[in-house]
Image (cartoon, coloured by chain):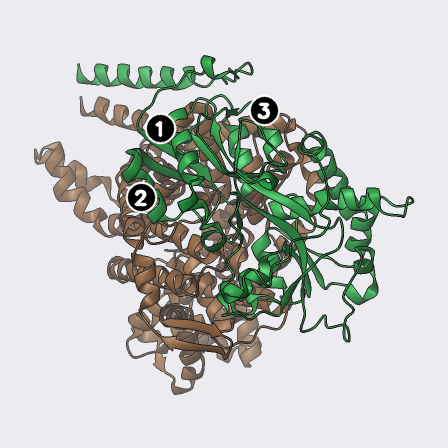
Amino acid sequence: MPEMNIRLSNSCALLAYTLLVILPLWLALDRLIWVAGANPLDWYSSLEQNYVSQGVIQFTFIQALTSTLATLAIGLPIAWQLGRYKWPFQSFTKAILTMPFVMPSIVAAMGFLHIVGRAGLNIRVDDSTWFTTLIIAHAWFNMALVIRFCEPVISTLDPRLEEQMRLLPAGSSKTGRFRHLWAPLLAPSIAAAACMTFVFSFTSFALVRWITLGDNTLESVMAGIGSSAGIEGYMISRNEIVLGSSMIQFTILLLSLFLMSWLQQKRQSLLPQVSEEVVKQSNPKGWTVIGPALAFALSPLIAVFWASFRIRNTDSSGTHYTWETSGWEFAFSSSNSMTSAWDALYNSLGYASLTLIIALPLGWILAQTILDVEKDKPRFARFLDVLTMLPFAISSVMIGLGVMLGMIRIDAEFFYSFWPTPALAHVMITTPFVVRIMLPALRAIDPEYDECGRTLGISKWRRFFQIKLPLLRGSILVAVIFTLAMSLGEFGASWVVTRNSDWTTLPIMIDSLRAIPYNNSLTAPAACAVSSVLMGITLVLFTWAEKFRPSRDGGMF
Amino acid sequence: MKRFTFLVGVLILNLTISGCLTDKIDDNKASQPEEYEWVDDGELVIVTYDVYGLTDEMLEQFENESGYEVTLLKLDDAGSVLDHLLQHKGQQVADIAIGLDNTYLQTAIDNNVLWEHNAMLQNISESALLPYDGPLAVPFDQGYICLNYDSDIVDGVNYTVPESLWELTEEEWEGKVAIPSPETSSPGRAFMTATTDYFSTDSDNETEWTDWWSAMSLNDVIITTGWSEAYETRYTGGYGEWTDGYVGDAHIVVSYCHSPGVESWYNGNWTKSAALDIPKASFHQVEYAAALEGGNLDSASAFIEYLLSPEVNSKMPIENSMYSALEGYDLPEENGYLFHSVVPSEPAVVSSATIASNMEEWLEMWNKAMVDA
């Protein structure tokens, strides 16, 4: 009887996943191909034949590659210092340095805009300033990946290994030890971090949208022209561009996924490991790296908060800035054509909770399903594994287009008046992450615990609550917090899904505030005020997550 | 038993969804008011882009006066509004569209997505009714698209003030002109439309309007996605230098003929931006409110009446930085708003019908001219 129950819940989860995640994407693809025709070569050539997307492939690759290199250049010294040496408030320092990764990209965009912009350092020169800013912003965002992947490897390597190396001819010099010990040891981790950084920069949207206005990535082109996709006989080239862009993105992301899973296996190090305590010594000189790194990690956030109080006054006598709270008042009242920040906050929290309620059980049961069928049907388990990873290979704008076109095909009237609609996109984005977090945790539970419990005659539910749940507690909390943070900061998909003013979330409100021309000098400070709220919530969630993180998982989150 | 009920439930859910998957697009929509089928559900769903004239106070006042509950669907730009209407052909989710302009309107009409409203209107200015005077759409604001220049830099000494569009293809202007893309922006589309007239009536019979665009493309013209990027980020003459993402490499930009007036209004009677009155290089843009097929015709019409009431529409210059669509309401004289605004002496003349039947082809020609140059 319990067996039957498990099977039923597994099938239901699969069905729900198919309906919620796969179906909208399938419908969108079907619609686009119906308009554009099914010739991938046409899609591809359309990208270069249209002014709107000309040069975009090149720009996307160049900025992603440059960002990856910059991220490694900034991240590696930090990871080295963190891994090799003792620091006061070690976990706190590490938390600050890895925090940018969970910050919503729109908040980062606002921060960097203000640092470089007129009210900040005022170092704008031309387009190249903004390109450099974009690269640095990407590095800020992704340096956590380098730290998370490389630092555990460095901090746990038995120092005796290095001592032994010193005695060998090849390891007598610093460069020798680097070449023969550290480089091969760290290579898979660096490659994994580089791979993920490349992916995130490749599909960057909010940062590109706000920082490099003149240039587009494939992601931002899709977002820009996606509104005219899927209409029969109208603007056919737009459909081709969307299909071409998503095809390239899908290929790149899929390749990265495979590369990542291969690298992850390589990273399972067989070298002798010891506790961090043994490895680490103190290093006062290291402050020259860690100090600026901390300042770098915090500066965009401070800039956002600072800028929310700086109000510009321009009249015939010139321009000056004053300290005022009117930006906050403007954001939290609803005196313009915008909902107030309170409404946006409630919506954001509502969608985040809804996403959690759906994505957590769904992801959990899917992970359990994969585990359950692994023994009998390994091939089917592999298939499920890939199926649940599929949304990873689809960018958030593409998911937004999927939801939009999908709901037009099913019942537009219903979905447009249905408040939970945007949460669908959030579920699509977060469920795969829940699966990824829960799968290793579930796998790590020794089945003997459950069998012992059964032998002792403990009921199924008590076994679940008293054995399984406590063992999974850390991973569940990480999944919870991660789902909440991702949903709160989600921008690309929400931006593409038609914006019913009753659906406005904090990130969307930041974007709309910044997009108001003229009206008054309060819009930019108001956007920063809303960003500060979003930043605050994210920081609370992140600090909470840090408490429950398994200490040396070396994973992304 | 419970499980069985659940399975049946899932099955039914599945069937309903797949049943709805067939595309039901009925091309033969009713076009006569008597044949309209709709229900007054007490709601008004507005689809619009960021038309800033629709303030919260204004919407609230309408809700209080009419009793209708208002919902806004906000899209990125005027083009997205048309896209939205076409995407939802036969199953519109909104009752009224606000912000289609005269370069987009006819396409919406030709696709039968609009319904005749039943609002009682008066005092709409003749000029606003010039491009379209039918029952399917009502003008609510208007303005002229114009080139603007930074008079501090383009002072006749460092740069000569251009007197024709060809001058902009000269070396002096290389990389110094910003134009929003006609593919993604309505001012850009209006300006491109003006160039089709400009070059078909100029003395030079050898060249086409596409030749000018090709020459501009070779002269590194800055094409931007939207108006804001051209005006705020690129243009040196406006308020853009106060925005953070500012680049400031263009001294000439496509904007409105009254943009310098708006600058002056916000700067306390001061601006360095000026509008350029080149014959046939400006375009009269009118923005419309239109009732949508299958929507609540009563609430849409009530809102149109409200939007065109003197009390609301007279505020267009302040709230929406555009001219009112009503007779007798000019721009305010305060802070030099009226003084710094230009009414072009000879705007381009292109009929709505010509625009609608040619727009897609023009855009393709434009694209080709820009890419192949």
Q: Position of residue A469 (x, y in %)?
A: 18, 44
**CA distance for labels 1 and 2:** 45 Å
Residue identifier under label 3: B111
Q: Which residue is mark 2?
A: B60
Amino acid type, callout 1: Leu
Identity, as a three-letter code, of the amino acid under mark 3: Asn
Establish whether labels 3 and 2 are both on one chain.
yes
Chain B's colour is green
- B333 relative position to B119: left or right: right
| Residue A253 vs residue A423, the one in the foreground | A423
* Chain A representation colour: brown
Can you tell which of label 3 and label 1 is closer to the viewer?
3
Task: Please determine whether, in this image, residue A314 is positioned above or below residue B67.
Answer: below
| Amino acid type at mark 2 | Glu
User: Counting residues from the N terminus, which is met first, the one under dot 3 or under dot 2?
Assistant: 2
> Left of A243 or right of it: where is A476?
left
Q: Secondary structure at mark 2?
A: helix
**1 and 2 marks in contact (CB < 8 Å):** no
Viewer-nearest of labels 1 and 2? 2
Would you name the residue on which mark 1 appears? A14
Q: How many marks?
A: 3
